[in-house]
Image: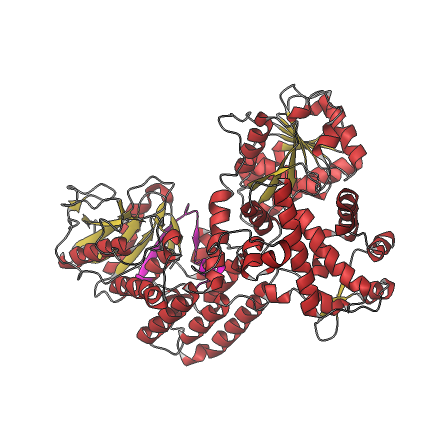
């Protein structure tokens, strides 16, 4: 399931008095002849919903948006008997996908009653246009007050979906669009599955949020696709920044039986189902629980543990509980396995890990789409052409993203023809690689390639609506570039800078129109990290900010609006954090001890590996910028300067046991004192620094709220979801009050209800 459904309580027996969804004859793809006799309301509050009244829902929690299940009987050519087609629809527009709460599951039970009563040849379940179902509503499940109620969430889903699994007639899931969590588990409960070729999202994302699939996913999936593929879908993909499956991936893994053309998907699905029922189509199945497959289970589960260790460093419980349940699917009967799955889900729903994940999920799904500080009533300027100053690695990534998302001409420039040619060729090569991997058709690749060109003359930007510079991080260089651009671009063109730390006001101060300049700071790798820091100087106009925000949306990025302060949000916090680690080593702490200090947090990489990824030269430059602005809170390490002067880029090495450590050449260069610290002392020091810097940033008005700091680190620095954002974590651990004398949030934010 995807967590979040309203608190369940015992339901009236299926088929009892109440609203009845009428089964009617209908042609394929048409609406039922008559509406349900008693239409249920789309939303039900605890005041009107007897199934949820008194269930302990917290005040202010949104009422259930009821997904109704309507049954109609469909005749299919060549099939004796009719197919009972159940359609799931929450009555809302396409912006709100169908979810399941108690009322929705009750409606599905009633629809199944009617389907079975009609003695059909088969039963099929499908969804409203472009959406199958996405499980339960996250806004509801966070209010569950106790373990018993949490367990009932799983039991209620199990009892409903088991009716499809145990059906005496064949059951089919026609997955016509987005299917996440409980939607996928509903499909798994059916005997067969078709999938629309344009389905946008398919995944079991629960581990990403700190729980596990709790409506049968850990038991049904490995039995269907085998342990290796189950580990990929349940554990690896969620931990890989919640990776979605494409239709062809779902078919390759065995999650669905056939992918069909979306143009006439329902008709094709009905015809395919008729073929299965008549015996004309056979679908092979493997008995993965047979003794001969035991080595495959052992290997898959070991790989899953390695993935979990690499991604979370043991700091998150959910992937390991999920692996336990997958392992049990080989030896336990389904009743036993589902009961244990319900127990595991109940434990995780009441965990800090899940509540933190809910907070993080809410930020990335809502706040990132509606950034605080966006100008009201201001229309963004249209964008029909983009210029990129620079043709290096970062500039090439930016150009590729603009071409892919905007489908407008993109022109790069650089200081000489050789660099320009390399840059443009690099972008074209990336496009060709996408086509070779099946991520773009040959026609799409040709169109994208034609959109990306190069020029040594800034006049190529004369009709560009946006020009973004991605040149060397030196204020004088950026000033020169912006001044030259102002001479050729149109009066209303947006000038953007990808600076990581420099002042927007300083680089635009001598322009005639500084109001058109905005910071637009991407994070590397651009294709992976969704954050863009939209930086507003005192001179930046509302139109420039609105255009930048609209551009971020079209690029499928989540913007955070920041003031024009040194290093903005992410780099300022990471530099402060890294400065404490480097200072501890400078003072005499064993580098291995300092590098392990943050392991209990489960960060995506160790501090020294992060320093290597960022690059010592970049880290030194940002530190110097912040030292100039803020003094001794950002000390400049002589050792870091020696590393940069020596031209070193690789800082990490591995010994014969596979243990990561400082490269011996770097270790020999590093001059250390004799004041060593323990791992706990280093960890406390780093967290204290983060708490102090975050509070100062809020006091200075760098961002509107602590939630923006959390969102920036989650989406720009890979801060783990299961920690729920840096500021709730600092609150939970008492660091905030110890360092600053107050919390960042009221009690209960990003944690268990008080």
In the rendered image, the vertical position of residue 53 relative to residue 404, given as above or below: below
Along the line of sight, the residue nearer the viewer: 105 or 370 = 370
**Region rendered in magenta:** 189-211
Q: Residue at x 66, y 27 (%)?
A: 539
Inspect this view and state whether residue 415 appears: no
Q: Is residue 499 left or right of residue 313?
A: right
Location of residue 491 in the rendering, given as x and y in whole percent from the top left corner: 65, 18
The answer to whether residue 180 is seen in the rendering is: yes
Residue 93 location, x and y as percent?
34, 39
Q: Is residue 531 above or below residue 639?
A: above
The quadrant in which the N terminus is found is bottom left
Q: Is residue 79 left or right of residue 544?
A: left
Front position in the image: 743 or 288: 743
Give the quadrant of the C terminus. bottom left
Residue 432, horizontal then vertical, whole percent: 62, 44
Magenta highlight on residue 285: no
Q: Position of residue 673 (x, y in %)?
A: 85, 66
Colour option used:
secondary structure
Residue sticking out furthest to the front: 741
Which image quadrant is residue 540 in? top right
């Amino acid at each position: 399931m995807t967590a979040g459904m309203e608190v369940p309580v015992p339901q009236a027996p299926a088929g009892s008095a109440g609203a009845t969804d009428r089964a009617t004859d209908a042609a394929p793809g048409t609406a039922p002849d008559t509406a349900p006799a008693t239409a249920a309301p789309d939303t039900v509050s605890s005041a009107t919903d007897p199934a949820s009244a008194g269930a302990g829902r917290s005040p202010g929690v949104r009422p259930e948006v009821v997904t109704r299940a309507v049954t109609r009987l469909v005749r299919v050519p060549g099939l004796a008997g009719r197919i009972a087609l159940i359609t799931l629809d929450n009555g809302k527009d396409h912006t709100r996908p169908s979810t399941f709460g108690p009322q929705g599951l009750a409606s599905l039970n009633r629809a199944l009653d009617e389907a079975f009563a009609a003695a059909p040849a088969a039963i099929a379940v499908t969804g409203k246009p472009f959406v199958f179902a996405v499980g339960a509503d996250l806004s509801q499940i966070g209010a569950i007050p106790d373990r018993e109620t949490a367990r009932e969430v799983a039991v209620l889903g199990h009892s409903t979906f088991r009716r499809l699994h145990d059906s005496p007639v064949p059951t089919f899931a026609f997955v016509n669009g987005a299917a996440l969590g409980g939607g996928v588990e509903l499909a798994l409960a059916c005997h067969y599955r078709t999938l629309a070729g344009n389905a946008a999202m398919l995944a079991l994302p629960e581990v990403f949020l700190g729980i596990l699939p709790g409506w049968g996913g850990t038991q049904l999936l490995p039995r269907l696709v085998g342990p290796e593929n189950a580990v990929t879908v349940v554990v690896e993909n969620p931990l890989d920044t919640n990776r979605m499956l494409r239709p062809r991936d779902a078919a390759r893994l065995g999650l669905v039986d056939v992918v069909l053309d979306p143009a006439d998907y329902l008709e094709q699905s009905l015809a395919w189902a008729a073929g299965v029922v008549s015996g004309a189509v056979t679908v092979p199945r493997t008995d993965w629980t047979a003794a001969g497959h035991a080595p495959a289970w052992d290997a898959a589960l070991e790989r899953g543990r390695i993935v979990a260790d690499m991604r979370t460093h043991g700091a998150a419980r959910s992937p390991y509980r999920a692996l336990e349940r997958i392992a049990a699917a080989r030896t336990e009967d389904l009743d036993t396995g589902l009961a244990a799955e319900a127990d595991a889900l109940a434990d995780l729903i009441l965990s800090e890990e899940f509540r933190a994940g809910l907070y993080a999920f809410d930020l990335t799904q809502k706040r990132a789409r509606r950034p605080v500080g966006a100008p009201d009533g201001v229309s963004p300027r249209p964008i029909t052409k983009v210029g990129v100053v620079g043709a290096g690695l970062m500039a090439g990534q930016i150009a590729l993203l603009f071409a892919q998302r905007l489908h407008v001409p993109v022109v790069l420039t650089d200081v000489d023809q050789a660099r320009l040619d390399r840059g443009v060729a690099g972008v074209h090569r990336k496009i060709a690689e996408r086509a070779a991997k099946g991520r773009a058709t040959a026609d799409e690749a040709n169109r994208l390639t034609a959109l990306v060109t190069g020029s040594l003359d800034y006049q190529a930007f004369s009709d560009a609506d946006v020009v973004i510079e991605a040149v060397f991080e030196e204020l004088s260089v950026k000033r020169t570039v912006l001044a030259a651009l102002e001479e050729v671009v149109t009066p209303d063109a947006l000038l953007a800078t990808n600076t990581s730390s420099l002042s927007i006001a300083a680089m635009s101060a001598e322009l005639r129109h500084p109001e058109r300049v905005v910071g637009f700071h991407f994070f590397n790798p651009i294709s992976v990290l969704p954050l863009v820091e939209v930086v507003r100087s005192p001179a930046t106009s509302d139109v420039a900010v609105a255009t930048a925000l609209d551009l971020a949306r079209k690029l499928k990025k989540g913007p955070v609006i920041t003031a024009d302060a040194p290093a903005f949000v992410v780099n300022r916090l990471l530099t402060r954090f890294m400065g404490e680690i480097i200072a501890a080593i400078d003072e005499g702490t064993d580098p291995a001890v300092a590098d392990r200090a943050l392991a209990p947090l489960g960060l995506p990489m160790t501090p020294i590996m992060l320093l290597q990824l960022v690059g010592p030269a970049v880290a030194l430059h940002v530190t110097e910028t912040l030292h100039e602005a803020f003094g001794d809170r950002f000390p400049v390490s002589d050792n870091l300067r020696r590393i940069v002067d020596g031209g070193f880029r690789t800082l990490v090495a591995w010994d014969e046991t596979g243990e990561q450590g400082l490269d011996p050449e770097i270790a020999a260069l590093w001059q250390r004192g004799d004041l060593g610290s323990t791992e706990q002392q280093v960890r406390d020091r780093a967290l204290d620094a983060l708490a102090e810097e975050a509070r100062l940033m809020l006091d200075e008005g760098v961002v509107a709220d602590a939630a923006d700091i959390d969102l920036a680190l989650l989406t720009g620095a890979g801060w783990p979801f299961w920690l729920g954002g840096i500021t709730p974590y600092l609150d939970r651990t008492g660091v905030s009050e110890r360092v600053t004398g107050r919390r960042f949030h009221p009690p209960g934010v990003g944690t268990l209800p008080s």
